[in-house]
Structure formats: structure tokens, C-alpha cells
């Protein structure tokens, strides 16, 4: 992050490893999650969906096409079919054979590790099942759920008042910054954190919105930090949790003023 003035106060943000560490390892794989943990991530972010036969697995896209050697929608494939896929080779031969993780495998893999699990629901109507798996593995104290879907956030809050819930608030949706702040206002009764997409052309990650969240005690976590420059100012304004593809940039020493 370069040079700082002499009287700079340095703090380290809460580092959220977006889909593991996709700058160094295939996204949303156990290899990537473990690497991000070893690099010092405070939270590991992940995306969950449901298979045709009702299992919860980890995949960002609606289809398996981009990140595996298979094709088709997650919702049209069985767990067995999904587990046969190679989720590592697209990134590099050294990761060949990586599997699409199940949600349970992810929870169990980090149950005893000092890291928070940030779980994004990409499918609808899976809240109860997700809660059940979290309870069965016994990780309710170290999970934060998040969703773009307001109804999903509300539902989760209703069925599990003890688990932290975040609302994803995208700057790429149409609307003025004022409207987005209003949306965030609505969420205050439900969410304990709000994330907003970095999108310079919309200019929505303003100091105003960050101050707004801070004043209300919300943890503001923003994505996706893939570029050092634009985030420098946001970090100065009080951005708490950059969600990044580059965990290694942020955990290695002091990062913001
Ligand atoms: O954590 C928020 C972020 O992951 C949402 O965007 O598309 O990367 O799931 P996406
Ligand atoms: Ca996500």
C-alpha cells in the first residue's frame, strides 16, 4: 500500500477471503479455503446452493460450467454427479482433483479453526436446511449468513435469532445513493452487517454510506477488493471488512490509516 505520512495511525481491517483466495487457488474449494486461512483471513466467504436431490453444496455460479470440467445447473445435478467433477483443473493442474465441497464438509473443516464463516445463500428456500446443518455441526457461533434477498435475510433472522445475518446491498442495482441508504435503513431490524459492491461508476461506496453504517453499529463489509487504489480511500473512511480475492495483500502487515 505504499508510503504513509509520518503521523499515520495504522490498523488492520477485518479481512474477508472472498470464495477462498481465488488469486492463488481455485475459488470455493477446500484447497482455497485452507490457503486463505493459512494466510490469515478473519472470515472465509462462500456461496451455497442446493442440488437436484436436496444437498447443500458450494458453488458461486448457477451452473458448474465455469469452475469445473462439467456442465449444467447445480439444481439439475445430483450430489453424486457434482462430486465427480474436477473443480481445480480450470485454475491449474496442481489443483486437479479438487472437489466441489459440500456445505457440511466446509463447516466441519473449519469447526475448530479460529476463523468466521461467511455463508452466502445463493438459492432460495434453503434457510431451514442450512440452519439444521449449522446446528448439527455445532458452529452456530462462528457463522454469519448473508444474502442479496431481503426475504431470505428476514426468514433467517426469524428462525435463528442467535445467528448473525448480513444483507448484501449492491451498488450495481439501479437507484440513487439515497435510495440505497433507504434500503439499508430497512435492513436495520434484520441484519447485523451490510455489504456493498464496489462499483466506481455508481460512486455508491461513499464516505457517507460508510459513516451511516458505522453510526448504526453495522459492520460494513464490501466487495470485491481486487485493486489496491480505490479501496485505500474507503479504508481511510472507515470500511471495516474488505471482501477480497487477495487475502495475502491485507493480512501481511498494516494496511490502512
Ligand atoms: O460477499 C459478497 C459477495 O460475495 C457477493 O457477490 O457475486 O461474489 O457472490 P458474489
Ligand atoms: Ca458470494
Image: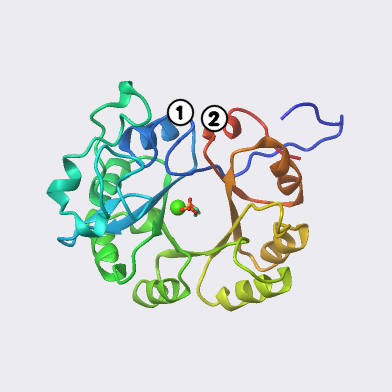
Q: How is the protein colored in the picture?
A: rainbow
Residue located at (16% from left, 51% from top) = 79
Q: Assess whether mark 1 and mark 2 are in contact (beta carbons under 8 angstroms).
A: yes
Viewer-nearest residue: 122 or 146: 122
Which mark is on residue 13? none
Percent position (x, y) of residue 188? 58, 74
Compared to residue 41, the image places residue 198 above or below, namely: below
Residue 7 percent location from the top left of the image: 86, 34
Residue 91: horizontal and vertical position, in percent? 38, 30
Q: Which residue is located at x 71 percent, y 39 percent?
A: 256
The quarter of the displayed image where residue 15 is located: top right
Q: Secondary structure at mark 2?
A: helix
Whole-percent x, y for residue 121 in the image: 38, 61
Question: Label for residue 248?
Answer: 2
Residue identified by numbered label 1: 24
Of badges 2 and 1, nearer the viewer stands: 1
- Whether disc 1's CB lies below 8 Å from ligand 1 is answered no
Give the residue displayed 59% in from the left and 31% down from the top: 249
Q: Earlier in the sequence, mark 2 or mark 1?
A: 1
On screen, residue 252 versus residue 59, left or right, reads: right
Question: Residue at the spot x=29%, y=48% of the render?
Answer: 107
Q: SS of the residue at dot 1? A: loop
User: Observer-nearest residue: 176 or 65?
Assistant: 65
Amino acid at each position: 500500500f505504499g508510503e504513509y505520512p509520518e503521523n499515520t495511525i495504522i490498523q488492520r481491517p477485518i479481512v474477508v477471503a472472498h470464495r477462498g483466495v481465488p488469486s492463488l487457488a481455485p475459488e470455493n474449494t477446500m484447497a482455497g479455503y485452507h490457503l486463505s486461512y493459512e494466510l490469515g483471513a478473519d472470515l472465509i466467504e462462500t456461496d451455497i446452493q442446493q442440488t437436484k436431490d436436496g444437498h447443500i453444496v458450494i458453488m458461486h455460479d448457477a451452473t458448474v460450467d465455469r469452475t469445473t470440467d462439467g456442465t449444467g445447473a447445480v439444481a439439475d445435478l445430483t450430489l453424486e454427479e457434482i462430486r465427480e467433477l474436477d473443480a481445480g483443473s480450470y485454475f491449474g493442474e496442481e489443483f486437479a482433483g479438487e472437489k466441489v465441497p459440500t456445505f457440511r464438509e466446509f463447516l466441519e473443516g473449519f469447526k475448530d479453526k479460529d476463523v468466521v464463516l461467511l455463508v452466502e445463500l445463493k438459492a432460495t428456500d434453503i434457510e431451514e436446511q442450512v440452519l439444521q446443518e449449522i446446528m448439527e455441526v455445532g458452529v452456530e457461533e462462528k457463522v454469519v449468513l448473508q444474502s442479496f434477498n431481503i426475504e431470505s435475510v428476514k426468514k433467517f433472522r426469524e428462525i435463528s435469532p442467535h445467528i448473525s445475518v448480513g444483507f448484501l446491498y449492491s451498488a450495481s442495482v439501479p437507484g440513487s445513493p439515497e435510495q440505497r441508504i433507504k434500503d439499508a435503513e430497512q435492513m436495520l431490524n434484520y441484519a447485523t452487517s451490510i455489504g456493498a459492491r464496489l462499483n466506481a461508476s455508481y460512486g455508491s461506496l461513499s464516505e457517507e454510506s460508510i459513516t451511516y453504517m458505522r453510526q448504526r453499529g453495522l459492520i460494513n463489509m464490501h466487495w470485491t477488493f481486487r485493486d489496491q487504489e480505490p479501496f485505500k480511500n474507503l479504508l481511510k473512511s472507515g470500511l471495516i471488512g474488505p471482501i477480497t480475492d487477495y487475502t495475502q495483500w491485507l493480512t501481511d502487515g498494516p494496511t490502512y490509516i
